[in-house]
Image: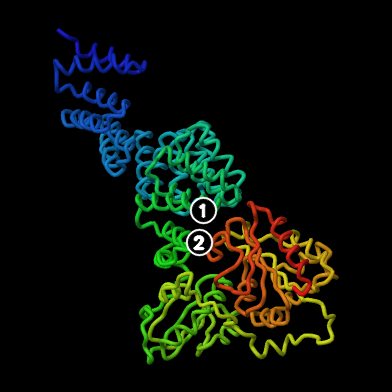
Amino acid sequence: MVDISESLRRGMALHQAGNLDAAAAVYQDILDIVPACADALHLMGLIDHQRGSHEEAITKISQAIKIDPKVALYHTNLGRVLRAFGQDGEAVTAYREALVLAPDQADVHSDLAAALVALGDYAAARTRAHRALELDPSMAEAHLNLGLAYQGMDGPDAAGAEDALRAAISHDANLAGAWLGLGILMQAQGDTVAAADNYRRALDLDGGLVEAHVNLGNLARQGCEFQTAVACYRRAIHLVPDSATAHGNLGVALQETGQTEAALAAYDAALVRDAEDAEVHRNRAMLLLQIGRFAEGWSEFEWRWKTARFAGLKRANSSPRWDGRSAPRMTVLVTAEQGYGDTVQFARYLPLVRQRVGRLIVECPSPLVDLLETAEGVDLVVASGTPLPPHDAQIPLMSLPGVFTTDLDTIPSDVPYLTVPAAAVERWRGDEDAEPLPRIGIAWKGSPDHPRDRVRSPGLEPFLPLFDLSEARFISLQRDGGRDDIERLGLGSRLDDPASAFVDFADAAAVIAELDHVIACDTAMAHLAGALGKPVSILLPHVAEWRWLEDRDDSPWYPTARLFRQSALGDWAGAVAALTAELGRNTKV
């Protein structure tokens, strides 16, 4: 007769030695004789789990629990199997059952904390991690789960998170999740070098950490290392093909490298996996607009209001959305929503709105109020944040191209569509006796808060070859930080600086109106010059924003604009050389 106890010991010895086939044979011999042997069923379930047979593992361990529900280890291992296959809710139930039977198991409290973190129940996870550490202060996993709970409750750099994560590493330096959590914390604090180092440490220990690959890609993208970012995202997708986040981020990186078709395919792959990802829809919209597929692009662009960034920009307003209908008795409010340049660019639609409604009110940032009052058909302009006058309907400014079904052939491109306010003309009336040289205005950087500012803003240094042109007088249009740049480069005698005295865009418009030519990177001054109908040369990065389309040296938005693009990422010198040569051929600018 088979000695069940001896057979179990022999099977467990083989199991612990890693000889799964031999151990399984022993357990099966037991089950052939005693089908209801709970220990054998439990151990066979663990072997199924180790072999990747998810359903079989759960079935066998559940059978063992049904036969003998009072063994805490069965419930614990069922929880671990369930967690391994992403069934965190069921795992929580199993862990709780185990703790009813054996309440002082530190490792089970820690495992329960990990499952609760996965479910987003961070307060309960913190409680369980604390209990685990009361029972075993040296348990690295419990410190890790405590750190993750803090991060889930109060953000990546939450108070207490760093201490918990570093405690986890001090007890087990090979705990990959702790290095990952520390990397997330460092990234949130803006220490990108430390963040990348921690992500790499995590991946050295566990190359399957998809989040670490994705976050390294995000850091590379932030540093304009777009090919590196693509490689990171592709590694993440190789590990988890259904990661919507990795596909969406891959799309952004591919778009930045100019691979538009591949980027579109990545966005589509992300939306197959998560059709409600508003950020992917918004990024896809800008790509569609970039390649000239305007009808689809304007529609997709409306997803912006569901993204975290734009939800914060949407002003509470109870009036209905204007849909473009003709309503001569209606008062419509148009609200500016993004940067100054966006507002200037799309102010061209205001006369079209006024043609269909009885009264038009515009809300915009205060520096633009006086300028937008010059737009045809505008009845009233109010500063953002001030009380709104009565109105019947409202619409965001950048939704107007979709309402008017704008395509490449129907862009409202008549210029000027803005003019200089009379008061600003008086403030900035020029010196009629000034030296009769062509007057060229220059703007060399945009807002540092813009997510692509590192890509689009060259700074003043790349413009230095322009100042070798003796047949020109240069005027700064750079308000923020312009004076510092001029003094640092010793250009005070070559570059006049009225911009440091600008109060608003009406002042800038008045100065631009007296110029012969404007040179600017992709910033509000470029849009303002175009809106005023001034000749403007616009320096663009290798992959420019959607509004400048692809492979063009002209703009359907601004008939007086000429575009000078980088031939490769970061090659401002080449773009400036082409511009300088062009100006040199035309002494009248």
The amino acid pointed to by label 1 is: Gln
Determine whether, in the image, residue 88 is placed left or right of residue 250.
Answer: left
Residue 542 picture quarter? bottom right
Determine whether, in the image, residue 59 is placed left or right of residue 437.
Answer: left
Q: Position of residue 71 (x, y in %)?
A: 24, 29
Given residues 535 and 430, the one toward you in this image is 535
Q: Is residue 341 visible?
A: yes
Neighbour tally class for label 1: few under 14, some 14-19, many 20 plus, Cα within 10 Å = many
The amino acid pointed to by label 2 is: Gln
Determine whether, in the image, residue 404 is placed left or right of residue 417.
Answer: left
Q: Position of residue 81 (x, y in %)?
A: 30, 33
* Residue pointed to by mark 2: 290
Q: Which of the two discs, 1 and 2, labels the residue nearer the N terminus?
A: 1
Residue under the point 51% across and 88% down: 378
Q: How many marks?
A: 2
Q: Position of residue 61 (x, y in %)?
A: 23, 29
Residue 413 picture quarter? bottom right
Q: Nearer the viewer, mark 1 or mark 2?
A: 2
Quarter that holds the N terminus: top left
Disc 1 to disc 2, C-alpha distance: 10 Å
Determine whether, in the image, residue 81 is placed left or right of residue 284.
Answer: left
